[in-house]
Image (cartoon, rainbow, N blue to C red):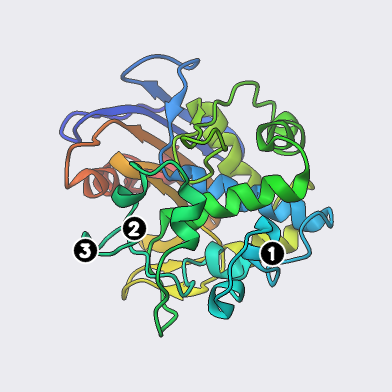
Amino acid sequence: MGTVDSSGYGAITSVAVSRGGEVVIEEYFEGDAATLRNTRSCTKTVASMLTGIAVERGIVPGVDASLVELLDANVADPRKRGINIRDVLTMTSCLECNDWDETSLGNEERMYPQEDWVGFALGLPVRDTREFSYCTAGVVALGVALERALGEPLPNFARRELFAPLDVDEAEWQTTPMGQVSTAGGLLLTSRSLLALGELYLRGGDGVVEHAWVEESIRPHAEIDERTRYGYLWWLRRFGGEDCFYMSGMGGNRVHVFPGLELVAVITSSNFDRRDAHALSDRLLEEQILSRAEDL
């Protein structure tokens, strides 16, 4: 089994890589294989998976379904009532919500001190344009809407429909101050479980998630910059000359899927206080994994 040198990349906590379904690298620099890792915003991509399963089951009518109607919320503004599930999955709703802009009224740091996070999201002003802006509050509302549609606790649905078929035994969800499950961040999973989720999409859903949903999720729906596109809560970009779709969370936490290489790479990290956290994970991916992928 291959190894990686984690020195020079900050607080990397684990690296797990599979090639063609076989684990070829598995190293732990903090904790061990049983340690639950804080996935941060990788949780959002898991929310996309669960939404796809709910749509396939007919529990959610489809991505054109109104977010407000699923929440059964009293919202008068027709522009907000027009926000659909696709808008949230692609981060292109009309809400004035941008976590990358400290001045945005919808910045997530303004949400966390509030008790009602869904109310925070639905109470935001609207903007005239619909373009990509990273909005954690919207994905919080999506998770609560999904749970209402399910009629059961979201963790139960996730355990039965997504995690059990992948032999994922442990998963711990974070909650809002009102006790609602947060699908926007903080889901705790082992590195092997994250690897299993990446492999699931590498295999096209494998009957757990509908293949058509996988394909729709990993195609470009929004443009972020000249290098990066966005699917249904999946990031799309090339690394080392290879097309990749990936889950990404604060601190440089990643689950990368490279269909052309049949490779999945998990990087967990606690570089939460470093502005270059994502750059460090990018560099580790390219220098320690992709540069020798053919030999793994």
Label at residue 69:
1
The numbered dot on residue 157 is: none
Count of residue discs:
3
Who comes first in sequence, dot 3 or dot 2? 3
Q: Residues within 10 Å of mark 3 (few under 14, many from 20)?
A: few
Compared with residue 80, is residue 8 higher up or lower down, i.e. above or below? above
For label 1, the crowd category at 10 Å Cα-Cα, with few meaning under 14, some 14 to 19 and many 20 or more, is: some
Q: Secondary structure at mark 1?
A: helix
Q: Amino acid at mark 3?
A: Thr
Residue identifier under label 2? 240
Q: Of the residues tagged 1 and 2, which is closer to the observer? A: 1
**Element under disc 2:** loop
Q: CA distance from mark 3 to mark 1?
A: 29 Å
Q: Are marks 1 and 2 in contact (CB under 8 Å)?
A: no
- Give the numbered dot on residue 103: 3
- Classed neighbour count for the residue bearing mark 2: other residues with Cα under 10 Å, few (<14), some (14–19), many (≥20): few
SS of the residue under disc 3: loop
Task: From the image, state whether disc 3 or disc 2 is nearer to you.
Answer: 3
Residue 104 located left or right of residue 184? left
Amino acid on which disc 1 is placed? Glu
Q: Distance between the Cα atoms at labels 3 and 2?
A: 35 Å
Would you identify the image quadrant in which residue 254 lies?
Answer: top left
x then y, percent, for residue 143: 59, 48
Kind of residue sitting beneath label 2: Gly
Q: Visible in this render: residue 226?
A: yes
Q: Between disc 1 and disc 2, whose residue precedes? A: 1
